Amino acid sequence: MVVIDADCHVEESPAMFDFLDKKYYSRRPLAVKLDCDTAYGNHNAVWLIEGETYPKLVGKGGTIFRTPTLMDSAKLKRESIGAQEMTDVGTRVDDMDRMGIDTQIVFPTLFLTTTAKDLQLEAAILGAYNSFLGDRCAASKGRIRFAALVPIRNVRESVEELKRAATLGAAAVMLHGMAWDKRLDDESLFPVYEEAASLNLPVCVHLGWGCPAITEVFDASTNFYSAILPVLMGFHSLMISGALEAFPKLRLGFLEAGCQWVPFLIRQVRTDNARQKRAKDPLEYFKTGRVFVACEGDEDINTVVNLIGEDSLVAGSDYPHGDPSRQEDMVGEFKERADLSPRLVEKILSDNPRRLYGL
């Protein structure tokens, strides 16, 4: 069985921004170390971008993660800094071998939140991210792939960047559950979905702080309201949007929010579809390999499978993050579940993510 980690991460580093266009290099994200006796504790470093700091652990508009790796908490993790940052791909591959992972699909950390408000600067920074990941994934000799980032507020630029990222080896495009102030069923975003489908790249809606207006309501004490719930919002908006009808090759993934919400959302989608009639019953999209959801090892997986079938669940280790979604021994956790058949485990760890990412 070829085990595919459908959702892991890179901790961004200053080396990433060596790929930034020279025009914007003087405005690159800067890693700043803080004293260790502040309210940030051992998360004592931030990225400085256009006068704003990320993560923001104090006050409203909170976000929390462990990049930049200057912070002391990054050094407490099991993984080396080079493996976390992908500046040392060889050590990261060694970690994959230790965990029994054959292929990783990499998502960001810093860019799980919105950053630069300047459209051109944002496009340049996300382009540098894609270039760095393309370079690092190439060094892995096929073991590591990445989800591209696009400046979604500029749809034309997003389409062009997606084309470029595909040439760099991207395996998906990541979106948040909202595109800044737009729902994902906004038809102005459809050219991005169309291009992703034409490139055989799934659109993956990932946990994150993608709507500043929502993020600003909450502090960093929990990411449930500002980062997890938007994944469910993205599912609802896409499943009622008609995008899957408009683009028959489009595939969707919903990541790092668990899977036990799926039955509730299917009911809600059906209610709204009965009025709007733009899309088919959501179960049709699951059962035809168009929609996938990441499950976690401690969930009631069989209840979800009984509804959507065995062919739509994937799993991600969340490596090298240290939050509650981390599955330190993802392969072992699923194989040791006596209530899951060996064939279902094989589908979750191998067959289904291969179909999601078109590998």
Image: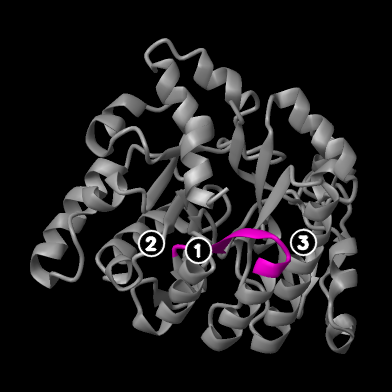
* Magenta residues, start to end: 166-177
Dot 3 surroundings within 10 Å: few (below 14), some, or many (20 or more)? many
**Image depth: mark 3 or mark 2 in front:** 3
341 or 72: which is nearer to us? 341
Mark with earlier residue (3, 2): 3
Q: Taking 121 as reference, is 15 left or right?
A: right
Q: Is residue 199 left or right of residue 146?
A: left
* Callout 3 secondary element: helix
Quarter location, residue 178: bottom left
User: Residue 82: x, y in percent?
Assistant: 89, 44
Could you tell which of marks 3 and 1 lies nearer the N-terminus? 3
Q: Earlier in the sequence, mark 1 or mark 2?
A: 1
- Residue annotated with mark 2: 234
Tag 1 secondary structure: loop
- Find disc 3 in the rendering and name its residue: 134
**Would you call the spot at circle 1 few (<14 residues within 10 Å), some (14-19), or many (20 or more)?**
many
Where residue 207 appears, as percent x and y from the top left, is: 51, 53
The amino acid sitting under disc 2 is Gly
What residue is at 12 percent from the left and 58 percent from the top? 271
Q: How many marks?
A: 3
**Residue that mark 1 sits on:** 176
